[in-house]
């Protein structure tokens, strides 16, 4: 059972990292020293408009929260909408619109109780709204982000047991069902809602004012927000795809918050007094993504060779300017269930050459897709190209459009730069590594692996469940498609007037992009 009145019942948590490939994320601000209200000028002060600069998705942007994939998408969705639960700083599910969840003894039925909350039009949030939202996400004709996460729910059998109570019937026992409630993109919208770009109505802390895709979105304080009205009068999201444009806008006073700064930018301004630099430590998984369903990476020996080509320390030092730690080809370093017993993989060019020769892939040539869409991507591609050359592999680096990169690399190409934000290891698997996962960028499709995931989810005992996750991770470590070379600091910049920003919240967690808790001094 989870009851927000009994925090001791919360699941043991983890650390932080970040998301991708049409993948999802949000934003958050913070102060340079990691204290959420450091340099506070007394009590929080209401009023004013905060302008936040993000990289965007061009003219195709939408405010449909179930389509939120990019950081800007999720930040906007988070301002307008709520989920039943969200991830705390330790990646445990924390109550939002749900105040309580309780399973039956067999873990295949869960009773969820909603809090008293209202949408922006004054109507209450009800069980029917929740069921409509989840059924919309699960539409087989759509590719909504949270579809794979909601798959365990039998939505035909699930029902409202009261205006604010729901019985979720599951297709199989699911021990980590609260993660489903907190799933990325699982926002609650009013029943029958369809018009999201012209007049979106949510239950979040801000109300809709205007939206120009690829340019800006303006929201106003929702005075009746269930968690208390935001201090800001207005929040404006400004699209600035170039990091230099975001930094210059921050320095020039055109915005008060700049999302995703490069490590070199952070070093140039940290401690200089003009702006505040916020580091969310080791928050962003950095990887190369190999598509396992097509040549040359359909041969596991080629994938293993690429694991051994990578000099991870050189990649962290060169692509991230040292602002991070090395990875070991597994997601979720430091999170619950992470298998840290596996040996740290080191560069071994001789063994890599041997594996390539055995696979008939000597003198291999492959294209590596990258883009300036994320900090360190183009630098990592160049470094890895040079590392691969030492093993006799020719890598052609292809730089793609920032506006369409995540969509382009999901199904196309063979090798690409990739990153991911914070999420439970369970969510990483369900969203990216199951046969039916909608953001399966490595095209890892194995029915026996799917079965192991289902076994883990139906295992009530935590230590036994951890043993199943260990089996899955060992297989991914040996033959998976993610070459995870590092975990980067996530870097934000704010004006010195910005207060109340949480600096200890990993990307994709509840307090990341909590602009309803921010004020201007």
Image: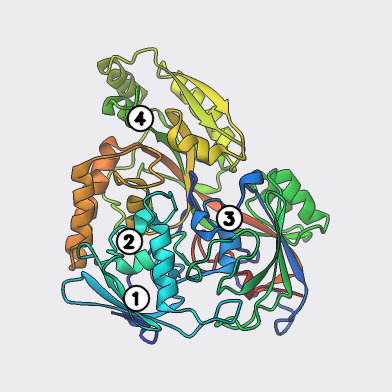
Mark 1 lies on residue:
10
Q: Relative to residue 21, is residue 335 drawn left or right?
A: left
Mark 4 lies on residue:
308
How far apart marks 2 and 3 lie (CA) works out to: 28 Å
Mark 2 or mark 3: whose residue is earlier in sequence: 3
Secondary structure found at label 2: loop
Instruction: Give the quadrant of residue 444.
Output: top left
Foreground of the two, 87 or 8: 87
Mark 3 lies on residue:
73
- Disc 3 + disc 1, Cβ < 8 Å: no
- Residue 200 rendering spot, x and y as whole percentages: 60, 65
- Disc 2 + disc 3, Cβ < 8 Å: no
1 or 4: mark nearer the eye: 1
Q: Is residue 42 above or below residue 379?
A: below
Residue at image x 29%, y 41%? Answer: 477
Mark 3 or mark 1: whose residue is earlier in sequence: 1
């Amino acid at each position: 059972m989870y009851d927000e009145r009994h925090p001791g019942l919360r699941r043991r948590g983890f650390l932080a990292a970040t998301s991708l490939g049409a993948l999802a994320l949000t934003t958050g601000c913070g102060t340079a020293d990691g204290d959420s209200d450091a340099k506070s000028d007394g009590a929080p002060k209401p009023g004013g408009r905060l302008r936040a600069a993000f990289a965007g998705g061009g003219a195709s942007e939408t405010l449909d929260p179930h389509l939120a994939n990019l950081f800007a998408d999720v930040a906007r969705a988070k301002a307008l909408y709520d989920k039943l639960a969200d991830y705390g700083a330790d990646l445990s599910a924390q109550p939002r619109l749900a105040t309580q969840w309780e399973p039956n003894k067999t873990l295949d039925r869960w009773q969820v109780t909603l809090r008293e909350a209202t949408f922006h039009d004054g109507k209450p949030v009800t069980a029917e709204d929740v069921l409509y939202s989840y059924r919309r996400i699960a539409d087989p004709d759509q590719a909504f982000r949270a579809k794979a996460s909601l798959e365990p729910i039998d939505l035909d059998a699930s029902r409202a047991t009261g205006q604010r109570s729901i019985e979720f019937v599951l297709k199989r026992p699911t021990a980590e069902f609260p993660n489903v409630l907190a799933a990325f993109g699982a926002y609650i919208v009013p029943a029958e809602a369809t018009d999201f770009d012209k007049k979106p109505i949510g239950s979040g802390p801000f109300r809709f004012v205007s939206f120009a895709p690829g340019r800006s979105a303006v929201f106003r304080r929702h005075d009746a927000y269930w968690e208390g009205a935001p201090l800001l009068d207005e929040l404006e999201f400004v699209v600035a795809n170039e990091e230099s444009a975001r930094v210059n806008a921050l320095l020039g006073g055109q915005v008060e918050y700049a999302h995703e700064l490069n490590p070199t930018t952070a070093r140039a301004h940290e401690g200089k007094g003009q702006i505040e630099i916020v580091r969310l430590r080791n928050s962003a998984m950095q990887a190369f993504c190999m598509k396992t369903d097509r040549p040359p990476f359909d041969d596991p020996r080629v994938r293993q060779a690429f694991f051994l080509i990578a000099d991870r320390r050189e990649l962290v030092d060169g692509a991230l300017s040292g602002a991070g730690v090395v990875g070991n080809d597994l997601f979720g370093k430091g999170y619950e269930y992470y298998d840290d017993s596996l040996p740290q993989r080191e560069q071994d060019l001789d063994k890599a050459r041997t594996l390539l020769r055995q696979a008939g892939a000597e003198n291999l040539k492959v294209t590596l897709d990258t883009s300036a869409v994320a900090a360190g991507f183009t630098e990592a591609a160049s470094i890895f190209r040079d590392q691969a050359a030492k093993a006799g592999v020719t890598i052609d680096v292809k730089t793609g459009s920032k506006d369409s990169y995540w969509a382009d690399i999901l199904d196309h190409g063979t090798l690409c730069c990739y990153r991911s934000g914070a999420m439970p290891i369970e969510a990483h698997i369900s969203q990216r590594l199951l046969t039916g996962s909608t953001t399966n960028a490595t095209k890892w499709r194995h029915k026996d692996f799917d079965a192991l995931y289902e076994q883990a989810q139906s295992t009530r005992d935590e230590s036994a469940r951890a043993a199943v996750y260990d089996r899955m991770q060992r297989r991914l470590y040996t033959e998976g498609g993610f070459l995870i070379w590092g975990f980067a600091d996530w870097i934000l910049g704010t004006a010195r007037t910005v207060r109340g920003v949480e600096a200890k919240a990993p990307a994709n967690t509840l307090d990341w992009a909590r602009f309803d808790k921010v004020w201007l001094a």
